[in-house]
Image (spheres, rainbow, N blue to C red):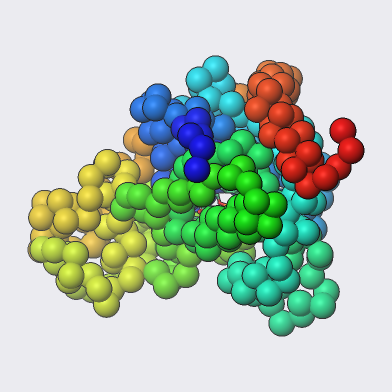
Amino acid sequence: MPDFTPRVFSGIQPSGGLTLGNYLGAITKFVDWQAKGTHETIFCMVDLHAITVPQEPATLRRNTRELCAGFLAAGIDPERSILIAQSQVPEHAQLAWIFNCVARMGWMGRMTQWKDKSGKNAEAASLGLFAYPALMAADILVYHATHVPVGEDQKQHIELTRDIAAKFNHDYGVDFFPMTEPVIEGAATRVMSLRDGTKKMSKSDPVDASRINLTDDADTIARKLRKAKTDPDPLPGDPTGLSERPDARNLVNIYAALSDSDPATVLAEHEGRMFGHFKQDLADLAVARLAPISTEMARLMDEPAEIDRILARGAERAREITVPILERTYEIVGMVR
Ligand code: TYM
């Protein structure tokens, strides 16, 4: 394998507001990578992925800008990282077409996200929803990204990205695409619903009380956490005591992630307390950490022209990387250049 430039890429769909799950599972990790400074960092609003299910155009545009505001408010610096809207860097979609011809139908059909989202009526799902992971592989590989920080739910898609890279390299007899590593770390790689600790916290859950939105104000954040589902038992002294208690485990994990700690340490400190008190502490912690972000997002949303300027500049910088990689890919597959 050739040496690849150490490069981090990750993306978030602008298909609704940002949740605490996106923040703890993804954005805080992006900020950590940016701070480390060991890798180039590229973060993307994947608007082309969002339209694999119906989107109202004006809402999609607003959500994309709001997602950009969320990145900025949470600490992504558009000078140190490259921030882009996927549709503004056309090489993503161009490489995705090549990967549509590399990936196999059977691979796509096995993706759990496809099965969940297409539901009982797969015939009516869009072709884009089925091909979704090939575009995701293109997002990553059009940068030759070496590391992809994500929440647990994206692991299968990164594995598929590796399969696509390996098949491309094998079929064309090259060592061109890297074997990208998923990075799934920390106490909150799978934040669960506040109403049902066995279900993932999701922006598409119809029940708003099931999630914290990054746009929620301090009172709303506190109220949702105080009302979060728990059980009547006190907190145990170590994580094994939570194995059969999904709601309790979820709140402990959220507390650990928000305080940059880990569940064992949190439990050692809170052993024997009742959840009524613990949830109040959790609410205070969450408000202290999240309310400034929602205030800053609101301020940035009053300056959409500034957001658009940041994205245009990001696309320009991104294309310095993607254009040569796409050109070389076209050469490898036999397009006349
Ligand atoms: P999306 O938009 O569903 O989520 C964005 C990121 O947030 C993480 N995440 C969570 N982490 C912990 N707990 C949760 N409840 C939770 N919900 C979401 C996700 O794991 C993800 O890291 N297919 C991707 C977007 C994408 C992408 C990419 C990601 C497109 N191209 C290339 C990485 C690299 C998605 O739908 O994420």
Please identify the quarter of the rendering in which residue 39 is found. Answer: top left
- Regarding residue 314, the answer to whether it shows in the image is yes
In terms of depth relative to the viewer, which is nearer, 6 or 64? 6
Q: Is residue 57 left or right of residue 237?
A: right
Q: Position of residue 231 (x, y in %)?
A: 28, 73
Identify whether 109 is placed above or below 98: below
Q: Is residue 335 left or right of residue 201?
A: right
Identify whether 155 is placed above or below 66: below
- Regarding residue 14, the answer to whether it shows in the image is no
Identify whether 287 is placed above or below 273: above
In terms of depth relative to the viewer, which is nearer, 209 or 24? 24
Q: Position of residue 270 (x, y in %)?
A: 13, 55
Q: Is residue 173 left or right of residue 222?
A: right
At 74% from the left and 29% from the top, the residue drawn is: 323
Report the residue that reaches farthest toward the bottom: 120
Q: Position of residue 214 (x, y in %)?
A: 51, 42
Identify whether 330 is placed above or below 211: above
At 28% from the left and 66% from the top, the residue drawn is: 248
Please identify the quarter of the rendering in which residue 79 is found. Answer: top right
Q: Position of residue 155 (x, y in %)?
A: 49, 59
On-image quarter of the C terminus:
top right
At 83% from the left and 45% from the top, the residue drawn is: 334
Report the residue that reaches farthest toward the right: 336
Q: Is residue 320 left or right of residue 35?
A: right
At 52% from the left and 59% from the top, the residue drawn is: 159
